[in-house]
Image (cartoon, grey):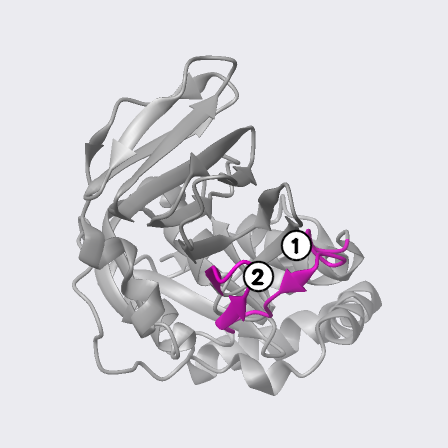
Amino acid sequence: MEPDPADTIDDAAIAWFVRLRDEQASEADRAAFAAWRRADPAHERAWRELEAIWGALDQLAPPKLATPAAVVTAPRRRPRPLWQPLAAAAMLLLAVTASLRLQPPGLFADHRTAIGERRTIALADGSRVELGPGSAIDVEIDGARRAVRLVTGEAFFSVARDETRPFVVSAGQGQIAVLGTAFDVKIAPSERVSVVVTESKVAVSAGGGAAVGVSAGQEVSYDGRGVSPVRMADLDAVQAWRQDQIVFHDAPLDTVLSELGRYRRGHVQLLGGELGKRRVTAVFDAKRPDAALETIARNLDLRLLRATGYFAALVAW
């Protein structure tokens, strides 16, 4: 392989880096790479800098594919022999800058869960809250008030009935008021909130509009513009996370990866402008998020590139 002469030396180094970790890399490729390094001191210097930034290069061997845990649907395409250097460059940029991200939301909340952790919290009024992975709540319960704020993530509420003190859950740009019931609340990465009721009834309000009644077996979503129409809910799918399963039905890949981020430490980057629009229908084991990534990569005809166990990228062939 010869990198495009129009590429910068750094881009050429990245192109070689990715190519040599491709299963189809040949002895001729390795010989050509060695010749490229010898051809100019700047080439050798760029390669050494790349090694220093990346580190632990041996961990980037092609991943072993797990037994499929899902059915993932998408049109398949013929593999391309070479990767785009800019895609790999974006992955490297991610690796260098991700450690500078802001502290996660909910860091100082009253109760929070770590990535991949589920925990049930007993409240002072007899209610219970099951926190999903990567989630957080603030609680205020006293003689006159029962209030919980879902700061981030997802929670299932089993509310003790009290006719004199409504139980109010705030999440995003709205709130859910109940007297005693059971329901699930989830904040999406887009900040849109979904509410699914499993018992009795709740009142959901957002955007300054009138409260919308939602009964058992129904769901709504909302943001700052208001509440969606009431629709029937798939209760088994919504509550699957409570049995360590993650269910997706015709969901965009970028949504799938955001959800897996609550179960897997690190960051997964999509390298390709249209990849996030691919659709996924799947049931994954929440305790094996890396196997989920491998299954997604195989069924969507993508390459999974890993680095140091923390960074990963899905790249089109």
In the image: residue 219, left or right of residue 276: left
Residue that numbered label 1 is attached to: 11
Residue 259: x and y, percent? Answer: 43, 56
**Residue shown at 23% from the left, 56% from the top:** 237
In the image: residue 50, left or right of residue 183: right
Look at the picture and state if 211 lies above or below 49: above
Q: How many marks?
A: 2
**For mark 2, does the 10 Å Cα neighbourhood hold few (<14), some (14 to 19), or many (20 or more) residues?**
many
Q: In the rendered image, which quarter is residue 257 located in?
A: bottom left
Residue that numbered label 2 is attached to: 15
**Residue shown at 75% from the left, 61% from the top:** 96
**Residue shown at 52% from the left, 21% from the top:** 224
What amino acid type is highlighted by mark number 2?
A: Ala
**Residue shown at 49% from the left, 70% from the top:** 120
What secondary structure is marked by label 1?
helix
Q: Which residues are magenta?
A: 103-130
Residue 159 falls within the magenta-colored stretch: no
Q: How far apart are labels 2 and 1 at the CA level?
A: 6 Å
Q: Is residue 77 visible?
A: no
Residue 291: x and y, percent? Answer: 35, 77
Query: Closer to the camera, 118 or 272?
Result: 118
In the image: residue 223, left or right of residue 203: right
Query: Closer to the camera, 128 or 282?
Result: 128
Q: Are marks 2 and 1 in contact (CB under 8 Å)?
A: yes
What amino acid type is highlighted by mark number 1?
A: Asp
**For mark 1, does the 10 Å Cα neighbourhood hold few (<14), some (14 to 19), or many (20 or more) residues?**
many
Residue 125 falls within the magenta-colored stretch: yes
Query: Closer to the camera, 16 or 32?
Result: 16
Residue 129: x and y, percent? Answer: 48, 61
